Amino acid sequence: MSIPLYAPIDLERLPKHVAIIMDGNGRWAKQHKLKVAMGHRAGTEALREIIRNSSDIGIQALTLYAFSTENWTRPVTEVEALMQLILDFFQSEIDELDEKNVRITILGDKTGLPEKQCAALMEAEKRTGGNTGLRLNIAINYGSRAELTQAARKLAEKVKSGEINPEDVTEALFEQQLYTAGQPDVDLMIRTSGEMRLSNFLLWQCSYAEFVFPTVLWPDFDLKQYHECIAEFQGRKRRFGKREE
Ligand code: IPE
Ligand code: IPE
Ligand code: MG
C-alpha cells in the first residue's frame, strides 16, 4: 500500500519524535462566529487525522499539547468543554488507536483531573501499554516546570533514602524521571497559529528540536500542512554544537 504524501518528504529520514502545540482554536471559533468550545471541537478533528497519518507514515513518537497547567485559569465553561472533549476523544478513538497498535502515554498530572477523565486516561494507558507502534503522548494538565520539579523531587527522595548518591544524578538518570522517560528527544516542534513560544512545553526534551511555526489555526491544520512541516524539517541542517567540515 502506498501512502499518499502531500509534500516532498523522504520517509527514510523522518523526525523520530514530533511534538505539536495545537494552538488557535479560539481564534478559529471567532473567525467562524462560533463559541470557543466549537473551535476546540473542530480542533479534535484535525488531531484525529494527524495521529492516523503519523502512524501510517511511520513516525516513532508524537506528542500533542492538549491542556496546560496554566489553562485552568480560563473561564470555567471553557475548561468544562475541554474536559468533556478529552473524555469524548478517548471514548470514541480508543478502539481504533488500539487496533493501530498505538501506545498511549499521558504527560502531566492525571490526579489533578476530574475523576472520570483520570479514569479514562489511565484505562487508555493500560489498554495500549503493550502496543509497539506509534508512541502517542498526550499532554494534559501538563507543564514543563512541574515535570522538571517532580523529577528533581524524585531524585532528592532517592538520595534521602540512600538509594543513590548525589554524584549518581546524571542527565540520563534525570531523563528517566520525566513523563517521556526512554523516548527519543523531540526532533521537530510545530506550533500552529503563528505564535512563537513554548508556553511551558517540553523544555528538556526540546533542547535540540527544530521549530516550525505555520500560521494556520489548528482546526485548519491538515495533512498538506503537516507534510510541509516535515519537509521543512528535512531541509534543515542540524549541527548539535559541532563544527561543520
Ligand atoms: C489551543 O487553542 C487549545 C488549548 C489551549 C486547549 P486556544 O484556545 O489557545 O486558541 P487561541 O490561542 O485562543 O486562538
Ligand atoms: C498552549 O497554548 C497550550 C496548548 C496548546 C494546550 P496557549 O494558547 O494556552 O498558550 P499561550 O497562553 O498563548 O502562551
Ligand atoms: Mg492559544
Image (tube, grey):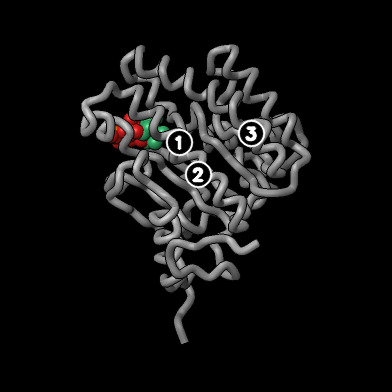
Observer-side mark, 3 or 2, equals: 2
| Between 142 and 40, the one nearer to me in the picture | 40
Q: Residue at x 45, y 70 (%)?
A: 8
Tag 3: Cα neighbours inside 10 Å, few (<14), some, or many (≥20)? some
Task: Quickly name the residue at label 1.
Answer: 45
Label 3 vs label 2: CA separation?
A: 41 Å
Q: Secondary structure at mark 3?
A: helix
Q: How many marks?
A: 3
**Where residue 140 appears, x then y in whole percent?**
51, 29
Q: Amino acid at mark 2?
A: Glu
- Marks 2 and 1 close (CB-CB < 8 Å): yes
Tag 2: Cα neighbours inside 10 Å, few (<14), some, or many (≥20)? few
Of callouts 3 and 2, the N-terminal one: 2
Q: Amino acid at mark 3?
A: Ala
Image quadrant assignment for residue 152:
top right
Residue 156 relative to residue 4: left or right? right
Q: Is residue 208 above or below residue 120?
A: below
Residue 195 relative to residue 48: left or right? left
Image quadrant assignment for residue 117:
top right
Q: Is residue 167 visible?
A: no
**Where residue 53 appears, x then y in whole percent?**
55, 51
Task: Quickly name the residue at label 2.
Answer: 49
Tag 1: Cα neighbours inside 10 Å, few (<14), some, or many (≥20)? some
Label 2 vs label 1: CA separation?
A: 7 Å
Q: Is residue 76 visible?
A: yes
Q: Residue at x 63, y 33 (%)?
A: 156
Looking at the rendering, in which quadrant would you find the N terminus? bottom right
Task: Quickly name the residue at label 3.
Answer: 156
Does label 1 point to a residue whose CB lies under 8 Å from ligand 1? no
Image quadrant assignment for residue 115:
top right
**Where residue 131 appears, x then y in whole percent?**
75, 42
Q: Secondary structure at mark 1?
A: helix
